[in-house]
Image: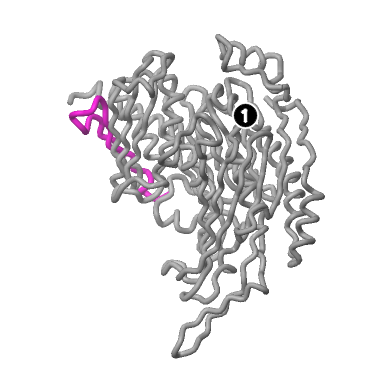
Amino acid sequence: MSFESKIFRCHQGYLKNTDGSALLTEGTTSVLAGVYGPGDIRESRQNAQKGVVEVNFRPKIGIPTLNEKYLEQFVRKVLESAIILEDHPRSCFYVITQIMESRGSLLACSINAAVLALQDAGVSMNFIPVAVCVAVCEKEDINGVKNNQMVVGPNKEDEETQIAHMTFTFNSVTNNLACCHQQGSLSQEMYDKCLQLAQQESSDKLKAFREVLSANYIGCR
Amino acid sequence: MERSILLQPQPEELFNKYLENDVRADERKMGEMRDIQMKPGVISNAHGSARVSIGNTVLICGIKAELTKPSPEEPGRGLIIPNVELPPLCSPIYKSGAPCEKAQTATKFLDNLLKCTNIVDTEQLCITRDVLTWVLYADIICINYDGNLLDASVTAILLALANVKLPMVKVNEDEESDEITMDDTKTFQLNIKSLPVSSSFATFDKYILRDPTRKEEAMTTGMVTYVVDEDDNIVYTEKNGGDMMTEKMSMSCIKRSRDHGGRVRKSLQQFNTTTTNDEQMNEDADEIYDMMKMNEDADGNR
């Protein structure tokens, strides 16, 4: 793992107009998330029993395409199970994730940024979703032999040689899988190894989340 | 016969009662799939087509091939462009206009799946490098939507790709003219290298429902889809929201996906013949029209 992938920097409260925001940099990827909520939503889209989550995934350049629509559903579904929506009936949480720099592990960084923005807004959650990205890449070792290596938090160079790419989101309370996206051929053995590796990494990441929060609330601003 | 859960005054309680008694509203067991029926070559004007139905969910896939210049990034490869449509015809939820979110995400799912697997090696679509290539537009239209869109779409697109017959094309490399001759009498079929099969499950609390219907999808909180290929490798996983999955639940789902994959693959391979005689192929298709009912054991499903 290179030095770059160890970078985890978050600035909460970055935006002044939103209820909560977070600018998260993981490795070389950077995502800015803003949250408005709980707020108004038109009657046809309201839910009388619980709140609704809407996510707007915006690419760095250009208008959102099918790709962004696809990633949006992952962020939305994770937040729907994480936020205690029963406390906010007939309301809506608008989450806007703006990609500032996409150089690997994009989906994991976006989910984490959205979660940190919700924390900044003070929204009560059932659990903290922690997203980790793992890729299986073809790497050459010292002897020039090509083999498959698991890389946690792959950067752009790693993703170019990848055979499989996974994003796992864990429940901080029970450590079970909240959300998963995997593409690329993997044997059952490799899948289990990657899942274990991701689980270990998620506990480190959760500590980093806690440090970010402590810095904001305990330290002086 | 399916009891209309949603018309009851307290749908969630009734749904819970069904699940506690280990049965579903349409009297299936938790791990039981609905009947799958497949038929290739249903659209005569298309280069390849298929109709797949899982229970009441009916999808038609039509593939139209066009000639184009290959993209500069991959000059030796062709393209397969999927598109899933959920017209207002298939369900009262969908309105006319822009494609709904479900259709868009299903399109992207198929696009990702085609790119990360070796179903069709797109090099065989290329006629002349950097000059001419085939692009296949695969349109999947849902005629009737009753849950489990992804499984049906994957099966439909596999069957339609296996059914594609492309005419032989020659580029006349004359210095004066750039003629393209197409020979309709000689056709070639695509070499399908891999048959990944998808299996979807709906999650609700601690229950996992195999092959959910539309009403079950509305009542449950999340969906998991596993795509497994013939080497038992997990090729694609999509778990969208819903409740947490323990490792035991994941393992059980993956095992069922493998078993299901084997059975569907056997049926798909019966259609994957390279005969050029159309009549013969239609006769075979009619004989193998009904696939066996997919029954699974109820144990190990939680």
At mark 1, the secondary structure is loop
Dot 1 crowding, Cα within 10 Å, few <14, some 14–19, many 20+: many
Q: Give the answer, above or below, for where A18 lies relative to B254.
A: above
- Which residues are drawn in magenta? A1-25
Say which residue label 1 marks.
B213
Residue extending farthest to the bottom is: B175
Q: Residue sitting at 25 percent across and 25 percent down?
A: A19
The picture places residue A154, in percent across and down from the top left corner, at 43, 49
Q: Give the answer, above or below, for where A192 lies relative to B29.
A: below
Q: Residue sitting at 71 percent across and 33 percent down?
A: B34
The picture places residue B272, in percent across and down from the top left corner, at 73, 58
The picture places residue A43, in percent across and down from the top left corner, at 35, 20
Q: Chain of mark 1?
A: B
Residue B3 sits inside the magenta stretch: no
All told, the count of numbered labels is: 1
Q: Give the answer, above or below, for where A41 lies relative to B87.
A: above
Q: Give the answer, above or below, for where B190 lies relative to A177.
A: below
User: Looking at numbered disc 1 in the image, what kind of residue is underneath it?
Assistant: Thr
Residue A22 sits inside the magenta stretch: yes
**Is A148 placed left or right of A113 in the picture?**
right
Quadrant of the rendering where the C terminus of chain A is positioned = top left
Residue extending farthest to the right is: B287
Q: Nearer the viewer, residue A138 or B22?
A: B22
**Is B73 placed left or right of B229 in the picture?**
left
The picture places residue A139, in percent across and down from the top left corner, at 51, 59
Visible residue check, residue A189: no
**Is A58 placed left or right of B69 in the picture?**
left
Q: Nearer the viewer, residue B152 or A85?
A: B152
